[in-house]
Image (cartoon, rainbow, N blue to C red):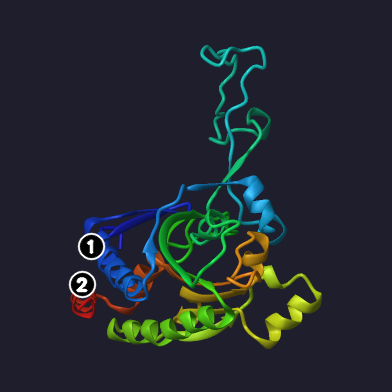
Amino acid sequence: MSDLYTADRGMVALGPELVRVMELLEERFLGWADECGAVRMIFPPVISTADLASIDYFDNFPHLALMTAPLALSPDAAPERPTVPTEPIVPADGAVPADRLGASEYALASAACYHVYLHHRAHRLGGPLRVTTVARCFRNEDHYDGLRRLRGFTMREIVCVGSREEVRDHLARFRPKVLEYAGRLGLDLAVQPASDPFFEQGGGRAVLAQLFPVKEEFVHGGSLAIGSLNFHRNFFGERCDISLADGTPAFTACVAFGLERWLGALLERHPSLDDILARVTEAAV
């Protein structure tokens, strides 16, 4: 597939043909977002460490975090004229050593939906809130594998914030839509329950996670999750002080699509790019 994309160390470059396929997939996902009344928003590619700490991110996903940091310059250097280092900042192995980095106040986003909840902090809802956003997401994985597992990837999410019934209904409506659409593309997806570390801290939350699954994944080929349905209960409502009209914490849910993984599934299923383009184009109408 080197003519279509190149992947190296978890980073991918897509050729024009796969960019077109991704655009067509996005048209379908955005169409669903419009149908449910989701407003379109774009957020920064980084999130402050303080905001991530407020939603327990570093307790649950420390292994995935990719932080940003400035280079540490001489403490007596003026900002406009920093001291030129006496030795190379980047050694021969290409990695800047930790002692040459300053304090990190921001992390690269690892999911698109976090910004939605943080943006609506201290918001009181008059009715259900639906937002769609797309983000370049970044994760420090233990290994990378072509389009299946990337260091940086594209995630489209359709988020609902509201009452328990409203967000559960949001997920229920998307489940058959995704399966039907995937079937038209020739993908036979399995829906599999998955774990969510936000609810695996032991005690009551862990029990609830077992009784009522909070995450379901759309899985291709038995191992590649290309999308998911995520029910967060009132976790983000509590952490971000988002409340319903009666003052109780709001519930949240999101439908997530990993666009490069959809491309990977299509390439594994169909030997011909022309076949993929024909199917995605036909399914867009």
| Residue behind mark 2 | 277
Task: Tell me which residue sits at (67%, 65%) in the image.
Answer: 238
Dot 1, crowdedness within 10 Å: few (<14), some or many (≥20)?
A: some
| Residue in the image at 42% along x and 81% along y | 174
- Tell me whether circle 1 and circle 2 mark residues in contact (CB < 8 Å): yes
In depth, the one of 72 and 5 nearer the eye is 72
Res 62 seen here: no
Secondary structure type for disc 1: helix
| Residue found 32% across the figure and 82% down from its top | 181
Q: In the rendered view of the protein, which quadrant contains the N terminus?
A: bottom left
Mark 2 secondary-structure assignment: helix
Q: In the image, residue 273 lies at what x, y percent?
A: 22, 70
The residue wearing badge 1 is 20
Residue at image point 60% right, 63% down: 242
Task: Tell me which numbered mark, 1 or 2, is placed earlier along the sequence.
Answer: 1
Q: Which mark is residue 38?
A: none
State the image coordinates of residue 40 (x, y, percent, origin top left): 37, 60
The quadrant holding residue 260 is bottom left
Q: Say left or right for 246 vs 219.
A: right
211 or 154: nearer the eye?
211
Left or right placement of residue 76 versus residue 159 in this view: right
Question: Considering only vertical position in the picture, is 75 above or below 180?
Answer: above
Q: Amino acid at mark 1?
A: Arg
- The reply to whether residue 56 is visible in this rendering is yes
Q: Is residue 83 above or below residue 194?
A: above
**Percent coordinates x, y for residue 128 in the rendering:** 48, 72
Disc 1/disc 2 C-alpha distance (Å):
8 Å
Give the residue furthest to the right: 203
Residue type, label 2: Leu
> Which quadrant of the figure contains the C terminus?
bottom left
The residue closer to the viewer here, 120 or 99, is 120
Above or below residue 136? Residue 29 is below
